[in-house]
Image: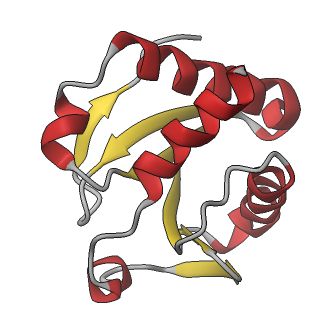
């Protein structure tokens, strides 16, 4: 039951309603698969981006429409920028949605934490931060 709620939440954030060119600006490097593109700035972060993409797919967070995610690193903290399909709704995200995303963040830190801490942020189509999740 909890997994279904998390999948619905993840699907909400990844309904790609923006034009691909919005992501292409300053994209740096990327890893692509069927329905997922993970952008990252530093070439040395390739392995962490690859592990993140594999984790995202393996845990069923890839939706039925293409998702664009940006990873950026500030020292030993990886920022995971998730694009909301509805920026206005994301600004007023219900507590239950925040809680589900914090759970994903915790799982990321448990699974991939050896390469640094992982922090989820909600962004608009041009990767401007709408919401920073608090926790850990």
Apparent side of residue 10 relative to residue 18 in the rendered image (left or right): right
Q: Is residue 90 above or below residue 125?
A: above
The residue depicted at 35 percent of the width and 77 percent of the height is 23
State the image quarter where residue 47 is shown.
bottom right
Which residue extends farthest front? Answer: 1
Q: Is residue 121 above or below residue 87?
A: above
Apparent side of residue 56 relative to residue 83 in the rendered image (left or right): right
Query: 62 or 108, which is in the foreground?
Result: 62
Q: Position of residue 70 (x, y in %)?
A: 49, 61
Apparent side of residue 127 relative to residue 29 in the rendered image (left or right): left
Q: How is the protein colored in the picture?
A: secondary structure
Could you tell me if residue 86 is visible in this image? yes
Could you tell me if residue 79 is visible in this image? no
For the image, the number of numbered tags is 0
Q: Position of residue 96 (x, y in %)?
A: 44, 14
Q: Is residue 118 above or below residue 82?
A: above
Which residue extends farthest left? Answer: 88
Apparent side of residue 86 relative to residue 6 in the rendered image (left or right): left
The residue depicted at 54 percent of the width and 40 percent of the height is 8
The residue depicted at 54 percent of the width and 44 percent of the height is 10
Q: Is residue 68 above or below residue 27?
A: above
Q: Position of residue 3 (x, y in %)?
A: 73, 29
Query: 49 or 86, which is in the foreground?
Result: 86
The residue depicted at 77 percent of the width and 56 percent of the height is 48
Q: Quarter holding the C terminus?
A: top right
Q: Position of residue 57 (x, y in %)?
A: 79, 58
Q: Quarter holding the N terminus?
A: top right
State the image quarter where residue 64 is shown.
bottom right
State the image quarter where residue 27 is shown.
bottom left
């Amino acid at each position: 039951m909890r997994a279904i709620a998390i999948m619905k939440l993840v699907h909400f954030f990844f309904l790609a309603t923006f034009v691909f060119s919005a992501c292409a600006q300053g994209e740096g490097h990327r890893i692509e698969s069927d329905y997922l593109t993970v952008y990252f700035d530093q070439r040395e972060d390739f392995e962490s981006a690859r592990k993140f993409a594999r984790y995202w797919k393996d845990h069923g967070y890839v939706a039925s429409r293409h998702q664009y995610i940006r990873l950026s690193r500030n020292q030993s903290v990886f920022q995971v920028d998730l694009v909301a399909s509805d920026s206005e709704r994301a600004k007023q995200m219900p507590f239950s949605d925040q809680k589900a995303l914090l759970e994903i963040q915790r799982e990321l830190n448990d699974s991939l934490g050896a390469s640094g801490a992982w922090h989820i942020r909600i962004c608009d189509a041009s990767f401007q931060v709408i919401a920073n999740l608090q926790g850990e």
